[in-house]
Image (spheres, rainbow, N blue to C red):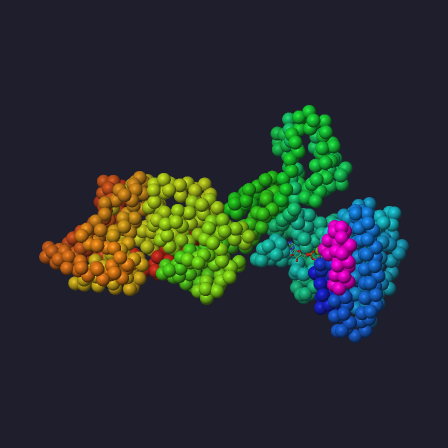
């Protein structure tokens, strides 16, 4: 004998009913079968809503119509497509159900109260609809069907809405009433009866449990749960799209998993099956050929975590106070109070000081739990032996589950470091001595982040980088192109790099699931999903989309944005930027940035602020960490000025050289930013501060490229025209130098704790003589590098190298780097 259970998702519409009928007829050819059905998808929710909203007669009428319509939509579609399907028969039955429903609701409406046993009757009606449709459908296909009535045999305790089956009695009654089925057995799930003949329900999602009880009663060898997924996944596939199906689970693993929230199985299902060694399969109605998951008696092989689950909607109750300490029987009184109120506790943790017992209950039970505790501990509370009972709601439990976790070291450590990585605070912890599960209580709003990171670290080994790019000028757009080109190759290395937001002057255009970078410009122009470039708004998006490694990439030279980095770091973003403004603001802000990054365990990365793509900052930081000290520095730090001064050697005028540099995108949009010397001064200050020098921008001695007498006011184009007025001045300077066998170079120096930016004439023997055409060179004289300096040299300008440097910083935000 084989029991097949079809859930509401498998009975959502006419097409699904046909799929179900096909599976049933196939199976019936191989074996004796009995089928358990849920209500068509959505119907029980609707009935629950009606039972909870009995206040208005109008709403009731509206609800009745919807119930009837939902059922008849399926019936009508089947009447049209299946020969011999007598829709009117089913519709008449549905009308009977509607009348029953009307009576229950009207009664409750008049009473202004819906007692639990009436509530149970109301919410159980959806299963009847499914049985009626399927019975007619199978009959139309000439299959003999016998309806099994749970009220006849499935005995439960007295709880109307979350009843527990009495297996022994049910088995005996079943044997006496259904010893031999005349055809395919067909039973509504979710329903039971108490000893007084009063209808009970088995709790939401309880048809799985009905199937398990029927399997026991009918002495089935197999119980198949048919649903809308291809088995049990190693995490909820709705929350974790990369979750994978498990081939096998032991009964114990399945029990833990369902108990801790995996909705695919009702928590009480596995108990009866395990007790009677009945194999259980989880199968997909839409893909019956998929293998599914087998749940059986053997312990799982392998030494690892099998799955992660989360159980939401919990409240934690804390009972604490001096009266708890060492007092024998306190815990038993607490849980007696719970059992008295018929409340199940989901997880318990107690401190070894015995000062406090914390436990979780479903939020729906929290108020009653508190009341029951107040009654049980009235005296202790009155005398101050107990502190007021504290409730914390909106909590979830995240559990790691697997037989293989036993005796394994490091699982808990990995769990906690994953939670830290997701910036999730752990409120309570529990692991029982079977070591088959470890559970932590976290805030519900953080639960998806938590399972996402745990899944990455335990299973998929994928790491994500979630980019929010501000500025899509030369460097920003080149970065996007580079990311677009590399996304696939990185994914093959388990790195999911996605851009979620791109900001321009209009605000930040965002896209859940990541922007398709192949046409990002169109996206930017047409985007309707735009948020303000404000920390709160971006953070809100990150939270809603459960992004766990958000990075703000600032490719602007904007000062205001630079001054908000601390806030971004504090809100859990890494900050990556070629923008020099933040690092050259006050020493105080410089320190604040570093403190924020350290405290939030996020990274502030700015490799490209000096020497564009050349590995300057990271190299220096490593040297200084290793005890090196800067003695002296000399270098050409500006790609644009390297280009312009190089062109002067070749006899080009300064105005012409600047114009070409500007045209080629070597200069800042306003070339005055380069020619003022400020850009080089900022780079020098960044280097000096890296070396530990506590300097301000105003401490840097700058000799601007533009002579003092030059009027640099006006628009960019006016300035470019005016520039011709100093052509002669520079031509003279260049020929003076040439006469001495020298060339002019724009050089940054750090000597004796002083930073200087100067125009120098250098001869052929000078190492910076050959540095031109946009090249940068940095000569670092240090404690370790002497007398020969450490020299870095290479192209120091241009979008490609700068963007590649930013890209490198992005990759440094990956989790394995953060841990170090
Ligand atoms: P049915 O209507 O068939 O009873 P349910 O909606 O009750 O189906 O259960 C199936 C759903 O359980 C899946 O669609 C899936 O979203 C959810 N689910 C949660 N956790 C898991 C898991 N670990 N494996 C598979 N499905 C899961
Ligand atoms: N129809 C019931 C519910 O939605 C039982 C079930 O689907 O298992 O809770
Ligand atoms: Mg279900």
| Image quarter of residue 397 | top right
Residue at position x 52%, y 51% in the image: 540
For the magenta stretch, what is the residue range? 44-70
| Image quarter of residue 179 | bottom right
173 left or right of 605 in image:
right
Q: Position of residue 476 (x, y in %)?
A: 39, 59
The main secondary structure of the magenta stretch is helix
* Residue 275 can be seen, yes or no: no
Q: Position of residue 409 (x, y in %)?
A: 56, 43
Residue at position x 66%, y 60% in the image: 229
Residue at position x 66%, y 52% in the image: 262
* Residue 554 can be seen, yes or no: yes
- Position of the N terminus, as image quadrant, is bottom right
Residue 450, placed above or below residue 495: above
Work out whether residue 52 or residue 174 is closer to the camera in this orientation and state it: 52
Work out whether residue 109 or residue 293 is closer to the camera in this orientation and state it: 109
Query: Is 284 within the magenta?
Result: no
Work out whether residue 789 or residue 266 is closer to the camera in this orientation and state it: 266
């Amino acid at each position: 004998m084989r029991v097949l259970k079809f859930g509401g998702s498998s009975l959502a519409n006419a097409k699904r009913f046909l799929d179900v009928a096909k599976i049933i007829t196939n199976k019936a050819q191989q074996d004796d079968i009995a089928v358990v059905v849920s209500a068509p998808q959505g119907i029980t929710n609707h009935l629950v809503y009606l039972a909870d909203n009995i206040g208005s007669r109008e709403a009731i009428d509206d609800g009745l119509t919807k119930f009837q319509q939902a059922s008849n939509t399926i019936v009508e579609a089947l009447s049209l497509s299946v020969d011999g399907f007598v829709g009117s028969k089913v519709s008449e039955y549905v009308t009977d159900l509607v009348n029953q429903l009307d009576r229950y609701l009207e009664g409750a409406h008049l009473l202004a109260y819906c007692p639990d046993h009436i509530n149970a009757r109301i919410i159980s009606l959806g299963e009847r609809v499914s049985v009626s449709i399927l019975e007619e459908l199978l009959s139309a296909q000439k299959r003999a069907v016998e309806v099994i009535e749970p009220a006849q045999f499935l005995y439960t305790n007295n709880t109307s809405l979350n009843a527990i089956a009495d297996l022994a009695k049910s088995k005996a009654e079943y044997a006496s009433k259904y010893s031999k089925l005349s055809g395919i057995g067909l039973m509504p799930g979710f329903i039971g009866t108490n000893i007084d003949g009063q209808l009970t329900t088995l709790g939401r999602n309880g048809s799985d449990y009905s199937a398990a009880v029927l399997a026991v009663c009918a002495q089935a060898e197999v119980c198949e749960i048919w649903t809308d997924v291809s088995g049990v996944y190693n995490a909820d596939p709705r929350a974790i799209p990369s979750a994978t199906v498990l081939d096998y689970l032991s009964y114990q693993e399945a029990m833990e998993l369902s108990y801790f929230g995996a909705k695919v199985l009702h928590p009480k299902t596995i108990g009866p099956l395990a007790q009677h060694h009945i194999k259980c399969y989880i199968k997909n109605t839409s893909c019956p050929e998929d293998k599914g998951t087998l749940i059986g008696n053997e312990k799982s092989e392998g030494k690892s975590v099998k799955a992660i689950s989360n159980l939401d909607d919990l409240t934690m109750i804390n009972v604490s106070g001096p009266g708890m300490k060492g007092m024998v029987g306190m815990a038993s009184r607490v849980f007696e109070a719970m059992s008295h109120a018929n409340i199940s506790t989901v997880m318990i943790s107690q401190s070894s000081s015995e000062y406090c017992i914390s436990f979780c209950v479903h939020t729906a039970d929290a108020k009653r739990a508190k009341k029951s505790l107040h009654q049980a501990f009235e005296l202790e509370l009155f005398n101050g032996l107990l502190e007021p009972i504290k409730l914390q709601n909106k909590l979830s439990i995240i559990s790691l589950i697997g037989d293989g976790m036993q005796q394994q070291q490091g699982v808990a450590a990995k769990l906690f470091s994953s939670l830290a990585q997701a910036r999730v605070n752990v409120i309570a912890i529990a692991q029982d001595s079977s070591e088959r599960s470890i559970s932590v209580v976290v805030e519900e709003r953080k639960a998806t982040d938590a399972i996402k990171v745990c899944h990455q670290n335990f299973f998929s080994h994928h790491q994500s980088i979630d980019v929010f790019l501000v500025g899509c000028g030369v460097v920003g757009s080149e970065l996007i192109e580079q990311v677009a080109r590399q996304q696939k190759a990185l994914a093959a290395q388990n790195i999911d790099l996605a851009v979620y937001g791109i900001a321009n002057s209009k605000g930040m255009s965002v896209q859940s699931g990541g922007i398709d970078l192949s046409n990002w410009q169109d996206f930017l122009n047409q985007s309707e999903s735009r948020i303000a470039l404000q920390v709160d708004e971006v953070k809100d998006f990150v939270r809603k989309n459960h992004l766990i490694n958000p990075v703000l990439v600032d490719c602007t030279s904007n000062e205001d944005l630079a001054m908000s980095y601390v806030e971004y770091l504090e809100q859990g973003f890494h900050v990556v930027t070629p923008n020099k403004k933040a690092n050259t603001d006050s020493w105080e802000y410089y320190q604040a940035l570093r403190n924020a990054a350290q405290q939030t365990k996020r990274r502030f990365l700015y490799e490209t602020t000096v020497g564009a793509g050349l590995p300057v900052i990271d190299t220096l930081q490593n040297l200084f960490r290793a005890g090196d000290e800067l003695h002296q520095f000399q270098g050409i730090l500006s790609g644009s000025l390297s280009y312009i001064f190089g062109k002067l050697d070749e006899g080009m005028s300064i105005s012409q050289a600047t114009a070409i540099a500007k045209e080629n995108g070597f200069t800042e949009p306003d070339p005055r930013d380069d020619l003022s010397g400020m850009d080089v001064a900022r780079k020098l200050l960044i280097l000096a501060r890296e070396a530990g020098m506590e300097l301000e921008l105003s401490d840097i001695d700058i000799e601007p490229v533009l002579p003092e007498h030059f009027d640099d006011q006006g628009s960019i184009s006016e300035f470019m025209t005016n520039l011709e007025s100093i052509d002669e001045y520079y031509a003279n300077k260049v020929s003076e130098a040439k006469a001495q066998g020298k060339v002019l170079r724009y050089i940054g120096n750090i000597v004796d704790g002083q930073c200087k930016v100067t125009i120098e004439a250098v001869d052929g023997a000078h190492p910076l003589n050959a540095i031109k055409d946009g090249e940068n060179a940095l000569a670092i004289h240090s404690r370790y590098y002497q007398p020969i300096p450490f020299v870095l040299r290479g192209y120091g300008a241009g979008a490609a190298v700068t963007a590649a440097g930013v890209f490198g910083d992005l990759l440094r935000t990956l989790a394995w780097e953060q841990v170090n």
